[in-house]
Amino acid sequence: MLEIFQYDFMVRAFEAGIAIGIIAPLIGMFLVVRRYSLMADTLAHVSFAGVAIGLLLQINPIFSAIGFSVVSAFGIEYLSNSRRIFGESVLALFLSGSLAVAVIILSLAKGFNANLFSYLFGSISTVSTTDLWVTLALAVIVFLNVVLLYKELFFASFDAELAEASGLPVKMLNIMMVMLAAVAIALSLRIVGVLLIGALMVIPAISAMQYGRSFRFTLILSVIFSLVSVIVGLFASYYFDLASGGAIVLVALFIFLVSLGFARKG
């Protein structure tokens, strides 16, 4: 089984996958608690538009996806705070709009090829050395931000009004959380793909929540579930020639069903 690691592309895939497996549920847990689960799918579609821009301009799609996602994250938070449009409507606006932009740009750039499908569904063979280093560097930044601001994010997620009354910059924390989610999603495109990254952020979180423990325990458990999903999914992807994103999410769904069964017995 370990012969899989004699291939450089698999080593890169596992290293990037483990980094993503750590940061995705960290961000996803806070999104789920805020009832912002749709944010993950919205930013995934926004990042797809960023990929399209990268293919059109012939630059690294990961960089363009991160840039476009971060700018869109600001736009989402601005419109949400303006109270002119309800939260879910803002997400639907960006989701459909970014997907339309992506389709138009890709049709102009003639980008409907195997490379594009790797961004849609994830592909272990397309993770380059540059992608790996960018993923690791930004994953460390995302992780440190969550760890250092854990108490503030926790407070703002569970009771935003009380947190604001206590002097916490809730709006700034919300913007930062959405930006971190945007970066995490853009980094996950190569491994999980646009269509399924939202599931990797949300499913491990709701699986861990089935056990009804403390938030810190649930957060750690969600990371463990995510890492198991990524590692088992990558092995399955290699040995059964499957799309890595689909394999990872199916493992995550299996863990959720098992967790749900344990919760009902308890």
Image (cartoon, helix red, strand yellow):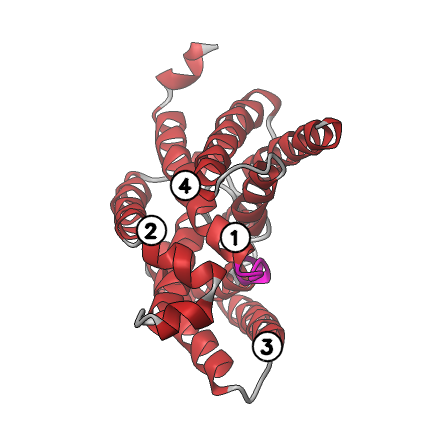
* Residue 58 visible in rendering: no
Up the image or down, 174 lies above or below 20; here it is below
Secondary element type, mark 2: helix
Amino acid beneath label 4: Ile
Q: Which residue is mark 4?
A: 20
* Residue density around tag 2, few if under 14, some if 14–19, many if 20 or more, within 10 Å: few
Is residue 102 rendered to the left or right of residue 183?
A: right
Secondary element type, mark 4: helix
Question: In the image, residue 210 lies at what x, y percent?
Answer: 63, 38
The span shown in magenta is 34-41
Q: Earlier in the sequence, mark 3 or mark 4?
A: 4
Alpha carbons under labels 1 and 4: distance apart: 20 Å
Question: In the image, residue 89 lies at what x, y percent?
Answer: 62, 77
Closest to the camera, between mark 1 and mark 3, is 3
Alpha carbons under labels 3 and 2: distance apart: 30 Å
Is residue 133 rendered to the left or right of residue 68?
A: left
* Residue density around tag 1, few if under 14, some if 14–19, many if 20 or more, within 10 Å: some
Question: What residue is drawn where x is 48% and y is 87%?
Answer: 82
Amino acid beneath label 1: Leu
Amino acid beneath label 3: Leu
Closest to the camera, between mark 1 and mark 2, is 2
* Residue density around tag 3, few if under 14, some if 14–19, many if 20 or more, within 10 Å: few
Q: Which residue is mark 1?
A: 116
Amino acid beneath label 2: Tyr
The circle on residue 93 is 3
The circle on residue 150 is 2
